[in-house]
């Protein structure tokens, strides 16, 4: 398969999917979502693959979320299609019969952190920074943030993360259970490889059934993903979302009330 936005490699039972848009801090666009879905589907079908690693190119970002330059131009109709691609990707990741390890090597923000939520395990560099950014840019983290984050860090902490849009260090994230392990940057590859080897030594059938059982409770949240898609699609093109995205792109403070604009 030929990819433009990702690098897909398979070696010794491990499939590695690398978001390859370092110039955009590995932000994803529609093409990225399609290619990631195709790669995960291939990993599922390949019986030799025992574990999948998801990461970002370079050392600055795992994934900084959706590409604002694309998202700021979405209309409700086009936005619903974009969010449909998000939903297809996350459903594929959740239903994958093999564990997914997030290799977090920098910024893990917004939709990037929601990708982290869909991974089964997360290993982060000490330089990693995690957080949600939806309300900062007029958006809402309904693609996993509002559903999965409370289950990982607790209800009150999730509300803090989403409402305040703060950024958290890798060590802070580890203390919350947001990531499994934090290591120095130079040890990240070795640590991920170690976890992959441990998984490969175990029964693939048992791992698959364990993942299905572990997912049961959160699988019941699926309707909220569908509702979230439609709610968020409706605000594409709205003043606040357009203002938030434009302010982000132009590195200025957003003005949430149109009558207060200069």
Image (cartoon, grey):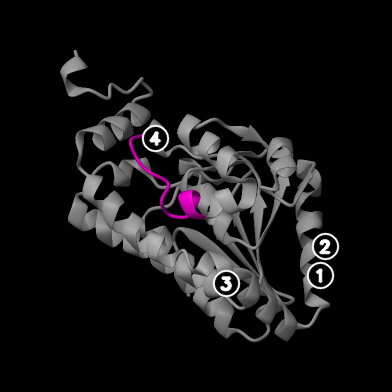
Q: Can you identify the residue that label 4 sits on?
A: 135
Q: Which marked residue is nearer to the observer: mark 1 or mark 4? A: 4
Marks 2 and 1, how far apart in space? 5 Å
Q: Which residue is drawn at 36% across and 34% down?
A: 137
Q: Classify 200 as above or below 229.
A: below
Is 208 inside the magenta-drawn segment? Answer: no
Q: Tell me: 154 left or right of 249.
A: right
Q: Give the residues in magenta.
A: 137-147
Earlier-in-chain disc, 3 versus 1? 1
Q: Which residue is drawn at 19% across and 49% down?
A: 75
Q: Answer whether labels 2 and 1 touch (C-beta < 8 Å).
A: yes
Q: Residues within 10 Å of mark 4 (few under 14, many from 20)?
A: some
Q: Answer whether labels 4 and 2 touch (C-beta < 8 Å).
A: no
Marks 4 and 2, how far apart in space? 37 Å
Q: Which of 188 and 235 is in front in this view?
A: 235
Q: Can you identify the residue that label 3 sits on?
A: 216
Marks 3 and 1, how far apart in space? 26 Å
Image location of residue 259, percent across then percent down = 16, 18
Q: Classify 118 as above or below 197.
A: above
Of helix, strand and loop, which one carries label 2?
helix
Q: Can you identify the residue that label 2 sits on?
A: 194
């Amino acid at each position: 398969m030929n990819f433009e936005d990702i690098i897909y490699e398979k070696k010794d039972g491990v499939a590695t999917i690398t978001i390859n848009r370092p110039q955009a801090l590995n932000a994803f666009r529609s093409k990225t979502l399609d290619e990631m879905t195709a790669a995960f589907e291939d990993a599922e079908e390949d019986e030799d693959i025992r574990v999948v690693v998801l990461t970002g190119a370079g050392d600055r970002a795992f994934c900084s979320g959706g590409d604002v330059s694309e998202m700021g131009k979405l209309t409700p109709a086009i936005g619903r299609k974009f969010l449909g691609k998000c939903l297809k990707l996350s459903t594929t990741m959740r239903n994958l019969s093999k564990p997914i390890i997030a290799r977090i090597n920098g910024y893990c923000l917004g939709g990037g952190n929601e990708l982290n939520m869909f991974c089964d395990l997360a290993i982060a560099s000490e330089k990693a920074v995690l957080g949600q950014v939806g309300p900062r840019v007029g958006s809402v983290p309904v693609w996993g943030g509002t559903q999965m984050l409370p289950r990982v860090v607790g209800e009150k902490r999730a509300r803090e993360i989403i409402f305040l849009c703060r950024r958290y260090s890798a060590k802070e994230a580890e203390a919350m259970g947001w990531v499994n392990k934090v290591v120095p940057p130079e040890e990240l590859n070795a640590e991920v490889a170690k976890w992959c080897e441990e998984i490969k030594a175990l029964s693939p059938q048992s791992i698959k059934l364990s993942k299905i059982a572990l997912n049961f409770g959160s699988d019941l949240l699926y309707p909220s993903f569908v509702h979230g898609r439609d709610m968020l699609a409706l605000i594409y093109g709205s003043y606040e979302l357009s203002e938030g995205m434009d302010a982000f792109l132009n590195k200025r403070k957003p003005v949430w009330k149109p009558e207060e604009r200069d």
